[in-house]
Amino acid sequence: MIFSRRTNWHRGNNPLTEAVELRRKSGKPIYDLTISNPTECGFDYPEQDILRAISNHASFQYRPDLRGLLSARESIANLYHEKGARVDPSDIFLTASTSEAYSLIFKLLCDPGDSVVVPIPSYPLFDYLTRANDVTTQPYRLFYDHGWHIDLASLSGAISPRTKAIVLINPHNPTGMFLKKPELQQIKTIAQEKSLSLIVDEVFAEYAFEDDLNRVPTTADSQDCLTFTLDGISKMCGLPQMKLGWIVLSGERKVGQEATGRLEILSDMFLSVNAPAQNGLGRLLAAGSIVCSQILARVRTNYETLRSAISTGSPCSLLSSEGGWYGILLVPRTKPDEQWAMELLEEKGVYLYPGYFFDFEQEGCLIVSLLPDKNTFEPAVKILLAHLDKVA
């Protein structure tokens, strides 16, 4: 074997993906309730503003900065100031994506074989990112009780002598659970006792269904344990193609200074963020706020549409969510989730995710994207619920 074990992933399509490809080739209609690319969802992008933002003469000059251009970092710092968080531009490191940010932080914190603790259920990216960086994952559980919560006993029990960091998603994907202030304080206490860092992913932070003063708006100004706060314009501005994310480093100053020095070298090895996005970031953020408001209105409306469409006595229910881009349907456990998803696709043309795609441990969960426009979402929901009512 001439290749590394870290890239020896299973690469075959799962049965649901194969069924989708067959249906598309046949020309039969598909109501896609998995879509997560905002540029394909019919939002009204201010195209001229975006084009002007990246049409900058300064981009013809290469001005490498291992943290990223100061003007871009100042624009990001202003975003946090608007949230009431004091962030120094020198504590911000630009990356091409949140995925790259995770990789840099794993390299910074972990030796081969070290671990990070991650939530389940969750987006299935962590297994790939950690394995590619020779890091292992230990899961901690979220539980549902009229809303989603972190199982703090599970989190504490997942920590081993080789654990280096706790990964938090705020709000969590796909459950839509926001971190609460008392909860975060307990997690910080655990992290300090175990000398762990926090990695907090806030990419969906703009998409809350309702306001709640008990939520953690951001961890970017943390003053105690070493914290890496991640965000970017992919979700915030609906601009995944512009490839610009960031890390905000905060926490205890002495440890933070050492982390900064090491992260500087790691960042200098790649210098991955393109110049047009950096030079135009201030204007991209302004234009992106227009898109963000449309996305927020869409996901709120679709969540309410889904909730109100489920009648009393229906065999399925919608789990409570506080935000994000997904809804979770609880369906009868009379068949595996994948069978439900295959049946809905092949018989009704409704394409959604079974729960195991997001590492749900129990059967009975189907995951629905809240991004599609009403011409796709509303008929898909009607067909989906009618089918469940009929066969459950």
Image (cartoon, rainbow, N blue to C red):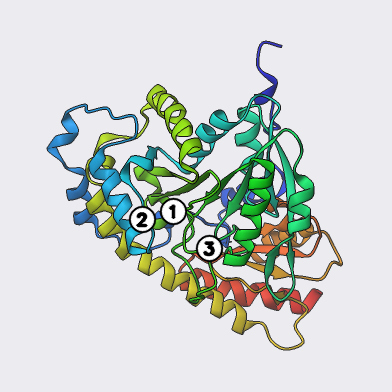
Report helix, strand or loop for mark 1: loop
Query: Which class describes the residues within 10 Å of circle 2: few (<14), some (14-19), or many (20+)?
Result: some
In space, the residues marked 2 and 1 are separated at their CA atoms by: 6 Å
| Mark closer to the chain start, 2 or 1 | 2
- Please state which of the two labelled residues, at mark 1 or mark 3, is closer to the viewer: 1
Camera-side residue of 366 and 146: 146
Residue 368 position, x and y percent, is 61, 64
Q: Which mark is residue 325?
A: 3
Q: Quadrant of residue 113?
A: top right
Quadrant for the C terminus in the image:
bottom right
Residue at numbered disc 1: 221
Q: Which mark is residue 392?
A: none
Decide: marks 2, 1 in contact (CB < 8 A)? Answer: yes
Residue at numbered disc 2: 86
As drawn, 193 above or below 121: above
- Judged from this view, the residue extending furthest toward the top is 2
Residue 32 position, x and y percent, is 56, 60
Q: Residue at x 85, y 62 (%)?
A: 335
As drawn, 64 above or below 206: above
Q: Residue at x 46, y 41 (%)?
A: 253
Q: Residue at x 33, y 47 (%)?
A: 88
Left or right: residue 40 compared with residue 71? right
Residue 174 in view here: no
Quadrant for the N terminus in the image:
top right
| Mark closer to the chain start, 2 or 3 | 2
Report helix, strand or loop for mark 3: loop
- Judged from this view, the residue extending furthest toward the front is 254
